[in-house]
Amino acid sequence: MDYAATGQEALSRIAEASDLETLEALRVEFLGKQGSISGLLKTLGKLDPEERKVEGPKIHSLRENVSDALTSRKDVLETAVLNARLAAETIDLSLPAPEAPRGTVHPISQVMDEIAEIFADLGFSVATGPEIEDDWHNFTALNMPESHPARAMHDTFYFPDRDAKNREMLLRTHTSPVQMRTMLAQGAPLRIIAPGRVYRSDSDATHTPMFHQVEGLVIDKDVHLGHLKWTLETFLKAFFEREDIVLRLRPSYFPFTEPSVEADIGFTLIDGKRVIGGDPSKGEGGWMEVLGSGMVNRRVIEFAGLDPDEWQGFAFGIGIDRLAMLKYGMDDLRAFFDGDVRWLSHYGFSALDVPTLSGGVGTPA
Ligand code: PHE
């Protein structure tokens, strides 16, 4: 018998099979238990040995050809299915990656938070006042009447118009008016700090027309200079995170404190760099002025409507910018206000770096 036609037909149908199910149906049709080629193989048993010698190899090679064709067509169809899936299930790698966090907390904001954290631990709350002030709160009530020479030292920015009470309006030259506002609003006893912006018409490498101060005020009974010294020392040790802070108090003059003291902090020279701490009188180094302070003047307590025989207190004003420069090693004050992104990303802090006393108030970003 000639199986060529049977083989040809089977191979062409296999080649045309367009999916795996059709191909499987063909496999069953040809090679399955009841399949046509399987049927041919069964006929071999009924042939006599001579015929079987002739027919056997033909049927077996037919079966082999069909089986090979099924296998290779199956490979082709499976590859096609896989390719279709790969095409449908791609990941778009060109999608933009999530942005890295940008923006930093300005060193001044960070230092203000550090200061507030330290004083909160000492029982101080935070008070605020307006940056646009009147001359009564900024000067007169702080024992600087109109003709007082200290007014001239403040290089004040005045507004052209007066307020409803006919008071001259100005940009506050220090945070001290918050002392008066808080005493008037809350009475005594009192323990506050007031951080904020202040303005003076002054501009060079160490002065900017706007800068930052933090005011401190304690009003209570039997308060004396020793309390002031202890408070300043305790604050500065916590702020610079070192025990060897040495303070030098010098007699000074502010109209709203009596006596008045300016405080210098000792630094030592390490490889030519100024490092806060150590006693300059025992080696190389020097003193840096960081704050003005004193016992609240009796007249200021009277202006606040309190009896100075009953209530005393101390006050201090610290330059925040100067303190930040000393702690974090910046040397040009003007860079604070340039808004240079490179400077900010170098000296700025992470928004997550919230100062805490337990975690260290000064851990750099
Ligand atoms: N207000 C003063 C200044 O700006 C500092 C100061 C504050 C001094 C409180 C004494 C008490 O120079």
Image: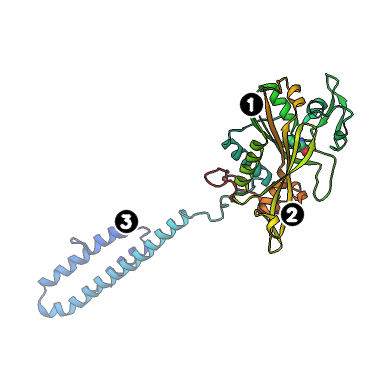
Mark 2 lies on a secondary structure that is: loop
Instruction: Find out whether the residues at labels 1 and 2 contact each other: C-beta distance under 8 Å.
Output: no
Q: Nearer the viewer, residue 198 or 253?
A: 253
- Is the N terminus in the top left, top right, bottom left or bottom right quadrant? bottom left
Crowd around label 1: few <14 · some 14–19 · many ≥20 (10 Å):
some
Question: Which of marks 1 and 3 precedes in the sequence?
Answer: 3
Question: Which of marks 2 and 1 precedes in the sequence?
Answer: 1
For the residues labelled 3 and 1, the Cα–Cα distance comes to 98 Å
Q: Nearer the viewer, residue 34 or 331?
A: 331
Colour scheme: rainbow
Vertical side of 234 occupied by 313: above or below: above
List x then y, in percent, for residue 359: 53, 46
List x then y, in percent, for residue 278: 65, 55
Q: Residue at x 81, y 25 (%)?
A: 136
Residue under circle 3?
21
List x then y, in percent, for residue 265: 70, 49
Q: Nearer the viewer, mark 1 or mark 2?
A: 1
Vertical side of 317 occupied by 130: above or below: above
Question: Which of marks 2 and 3 precedes in the sequence?
Answer: 3
Label number found at residue 221: 1
Q: What amino acid is found at the position of numbered circle 1 in the picture?
A: Lys
Q: Nearer the viewer, mark 3 or mark 2?
A: 2
Residue under circle 2?
331
Q: Residue at x 63, y 40 (%)?
A: 230
